[in-house]
Image (cartoon, grey):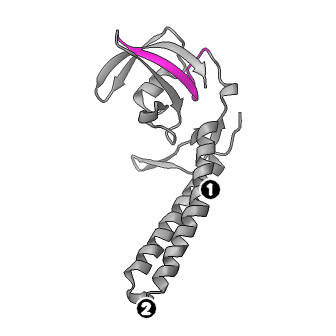
Amino acid sequence: MVSRRTPRVFDLREDRFVAKEVVLTVEGFEKLKAEIEELSTVKRREVAERIKEAREFGDISENSEYDDAKNEQAMLESRISQLEERLREAKVIDAADLPSDVVSLGSTVTIKEGTGDQDTYQIVGSAEADPDENRLSNESPVGRAILGHRKGETIDVVTPSGARKITIVGIRST
């Protein structure tokens, strides 16, 4: 397992700062690297070109195109910096290191609610969560509840929409 220092991500709760660890799968780590590359090369060049074009309009003190392009540049640089920090500080989990009999971060889990249909999710850190891609955060009510459980176990989960009973139908390393 690849591990890095805990990043400085804070949660304001009762005027206390609580450090939260950023966890990424290998896939999430690679996607983050690709996004940084895209922003650092293609987007940075596009913004620089817009700044150059805006300067050609003349007086930059009253040039809204220039101001807009400079603001976009500042936001882009801030985003790149945030993503680079996340990449440096993230704890990366590798599927090869995961237990196959217990739900853990990085596991792909098939669950069933009551007698309903089965759904399959990958349990990921909050930075990678995407319900549309069936990537469930380990900090979500369901993700938190099923961590550490085994195939065949039924867990009572309290969600914002009410209490649910979820059965773990299958677990596999991704």
Mark 2: secondary structure: loop
In the rendered view of the protein, which quadrant contains the N terminus?
top right
Horizontal side of residue 17 vs 5, given as left or right: left
Which residue is label 2 attached to? 59
Give above or below for 103 relative to 52: above
Q: Is residue 111 magenta?
A: yes
In the rendered view of the protein, which quadrant contains the C terminus?
top right
Q: Position of residue 45 (x, y in %)?
A: 57, 68
Identify which residue, 10 or 100, lies in the foreground. Answer: 100
Label 2 CA crowd tier, 10 Å (few <14, some 14–19, many 20+): few
Q: Do callouts 1 and 2 mark residues in contact (Cβ within 8 Å)?
A: no
* Bounds of the magenta segment: 101-114
Give above or below for 151 relative to 87: above
Identify which residue, 15 or 94, lies in the foreground. Answer: 94
**Which is more N-terminal, label 2 or label 1?**
1
Residue 57 falls in which quadrant of the image? bottom left
Q: Position of residue 14 (x, y in %)?
A: 39, 46
What is the residue that sits farthest to the bottom in this orientation? 59
Identify which residue, 48 or 22, lies in the foreground. Answer: 48
Q: Residue at x 54, y 13 (%)?
A: 150
What's the CA distance linking mark 1 and mark 2?
Answer: 33 Å
Mark 1: secondary structure: helix
Which residue is label 1 attached to? 37
